[in-house]
Amino acid sequence: MPMQANDHDEPPRRCAWAGNDALYVSYHDEEWGRPLDGEAALFERISLEGFQAGLSWLTILRKRPAFRQAFAGFEIDEVAAFGSRDVERLLADAGIVRHRGKIEAVINNARRARELRDQEGSLAAFLWRYEPASAYEGPPRAESPESKALSKELKRRGWRFVGPTTMYSLMQAVGMVNDHGPDCACRKEVEALRAAFPRPGASGRRRRA
């Protein structure tokens, strides 16, 4: 739900990074930090975070519709079946980021995600095991012990473009942490959503870094 202005018709307070671009504001208000567990949605976020390396997130948001079309909605099984012709097709697609290494990483990661799903039950259950056991109250950070542990394990399983900073951005985006600022109007709403969110995986275990 988009944030509402207050009784004095002042604009709602947001995290400073949201800026004034309508697309960025919408992403901040309606998506960032809200808990997510859909397999395609999670795989999309992992893939787009990898594409974002060296670029602005706003660039990725603007290209997201083209990314979704190019990568079959980020359905894991469909992307895992991509071959060399698909790589060349994607390199010719001006609507996305045409970086061979990142394109090939998404295809590789879809295959690794399929393996992980068979081994762990679901991508969601695996990722959410790395949710921190307690809230972080310190200054803004670019990575965490949990994101380092997640990155290390994914790399061990053969994933690419999943460094600890990228994984922390993923954790922020999908609600594994609530990094909306203390004055942001979204913070309490996101925390309530997180409190009510059923963690994927029957055991509900959290893996400690």
Image (spheres, rainbow, N blue to C red):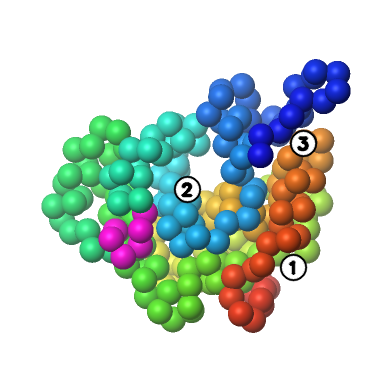
Q: Residues within 10 Å of mark 1 (few under 14, many from 20)?
A: some
Outermost residue toward the top in this view:
9
Report the front residue among 59 and 27. 27
Task: Give the number of the disc on residue 133.
Answer: 1
Amino acid type, residue under disc 3 in the picture: Cys
Locate residue 63, reporting x and y percent. 38, 34
Quadrant containing the C terminus is bottom right
Amino acid type, residue under disc 1 in the picture: Ala
Along the polypeptide, which appears first: circle 3 or circle 2?
A: 2
Local SS, label 3: loop
Q: Tell me the residue that label 2 is attached to.
A: 49
The total number of labels drawn is 3
Q: Is residue 75 left or right of residue 45?
A: left
Task: Give the number of the disc on residue 184.
Answer: 3
Q: Residues within 10 Å of mark 3 (few under 14, many from 20)?
A: some
Locate residue 173, reporting x and y percent. 59, 49
Residue 142 appears in the picture as rendered: no
Report, in whole angstroms, how far the alpha carbon at label 1 lies from the one at label 2. Answer: 23 Å
Q: Picture quarter containing residue 2?
A: top right
Is the residue under label 2 in contact with that under label 1 (CB below 8 Å)?
A: no
Main SS, magenta region, reads helix
Q: Point out the stretch of residues depicted in magenta.
A: 74-79
